[in-house]
Amino acid sequence: MYIRSLAFFLLLAMTVSSPAVAQPPDTVWLDELTWTEVRDKISNGITTVIVATAGTEQNGPHMVLGKHKFIIAAAAEKIGRQLGNALIAPIVTYVPEGNLNPPSGHMRFSGAITLPNEHFMTLLEFAARSLVVHGFTDVVFIGDSGGNQRGMEEVSELLNTEWATEPVRVHFIGDYYANNGFRQWLESQGETTEDIGSHAGISDTSQLLAVAPQHIRTDKLAPRGGFDNSGVSGDPTRASAEYGHKGIALKVEAAVKQINALIDAR
């Protein structure tokens, strides 16, 4: 009798503690949802999708090759949540990084992966076409590295010309990368153009410190990377997580403003 009563109460406790209907996760990432959850979100008005691109490239001896991926993942999530009606496609980490033979650009450094611009553009084109098939009406291209900006812009122009009479648009968000004001803000804090640098210096290192500090080799931080041909321009020893949070906030603000303006204008 006692055993049966105990079993009954255990079963009752399990029933009460288990939700009757599992809720979809609180996520803006497309690949963290099931296909039926994506279908339902589109039906409920979530019709903007972000396609974020990030290079796999050298970032000096102190930062991992996936720097751009970690930074744009953090920024894209903030953008998606601020928009309130957007999902984010899986991040594209294969972008133009230089020639193969002879190696040029970042391809001169071990671990970089490149795509010729025409193949990168084809990847973007068919990602956009796929997403539009499912009901997304605004496809947003955002890139965290320089080599992929032109390809994103050209694909958006190509598809918008083709879809001129359709209720869909592709938006290239160049302000995220090139017009966010972070360099000017760093200068206002007293940092010099030389120390800020153009690659793997204060700006990049600060942003990675803010979102994924485990991917910084702190014992390798040195002005200009510490040796010739290190791949570093600037002085990453002057980087800080505080700088990085400000930089990402400025990039997110610039992107959200441009996205809203482009969608409102169409």
Image (cartoon, rainbow, N blue to C red):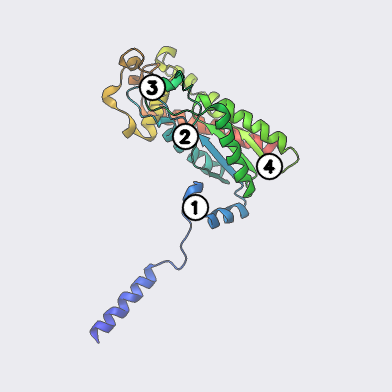
Q: Which of marks 3 and 4 is in front?
A: 3
The residues bearing labels 4 and 2 have C-alpha atoms spaced at a distance of: 25 Å
> Splitting the image into 4 quarters, where does residue 204 fall?
top left
Q: Residues within 10 Å of mark 1 (few under 14, many from 20)?
A: some
* Residue 215 pos. (x, y %): 33, 32
Badges 2 and 3: C-beta atoms under 8 Å apart?
A: no
Left or right: residue 234 versus residue 136 is left
Work out whether 113 lies above or below 23. above
Work out whether 216 lies above or below 196. below
**Which residue does the numbered mark 4 point to in the structure image?**
168
The label number, if any, that marks residue 109 in the structure image: 3
User: Can residue 119 be seen in the rendering of this structure?
Assistant: yes
Q: Which of marks 4 and 2 is in front?
A: 2
The residues bearing labels 3 and 1 have C-alpha atoms spaced at a distance of: 36 Å
The label number, if any, that marks residue 169 in the structure image: none
Q: What residue type is labelled 1?
A: Leu
The residues bearing labels 1 and 2 have C-alpha atoms spaced at a distance of: 21 Å
The label number, if any, that marks residue 33 in the structure image: 1
